[in-house]
Amino acid sequence: MASRTSADRHRLVTPAQFDQVREITDSFNLSWDQVVIPLVGGVQGLEMLMPDGKLLIRVPPGKDFEPWYAGLAERLSNMDLSRVKRQ
């Protein structure tokens, strides 16, 4: 197993960030099984509906989180989430 580099550790999604994203997805009544939030964040934030109907949310690292998070609900509102199963 490869060891994590310092850069990888800085890209890890914190429990607080994970909870904040879940609060937003919960407000859309999306099933937790249908929302994928990788624990290693991306270089930049991403929200994408996958072919299987799941919603992929890739959290940006560090100081980029707050501005990305501030617009998350609006970006999700503008997406067609009809294929994502509800709770």
Image (spheres, helix red, strand yellow):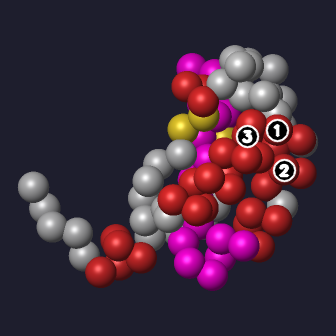
What stretch of residues is rendered in magenta?
Answer: 49-66
Q: Of helix, strand and loop, which one carries label 2?
A: helix
Q: Of helix, strand and loop, which one carries label 3?
A: helix
Residue holding disc 1: 27
Residue type of the residue flagged with mark 3: Thr
Residue 67, percent across and down? 77, 73
Does the magenta portion include 72? no
Number of numbered markers: 3
Residue 23, percent across and down? 73, 47
Left or right: 33 in relation to 83: left
Residue 87 higher or lower than 76, as above or below? above
Whether label 1 touches label 2, CB < 8 Å? yes
Residue shown at 74% from the left, 37% from the top: 26
Q: Is residue 29 visible?
A: yes
Q: Of helix, strand and loop, which one carries label 1?
A: helix
Residue holding disc 3: 25
Residue holding disc 2: 73
Graded by Cα atoms within 10 Å as few (under 14), some (14 to 19) or many (20 or more), the crowding at tag 2 reads some
Residue shown at 82% from the left, 34% from the top: 28
Graded by Cα atoms within 10 Å as few (under 14), some (14 to 19) or many (20 or more), the crowding at tag 1 reads few
Residue type of the residue flagged with mark 1: Ser
Left or right: 83 in relation to 76: left
Residue 78, percent across and down? 90, 42
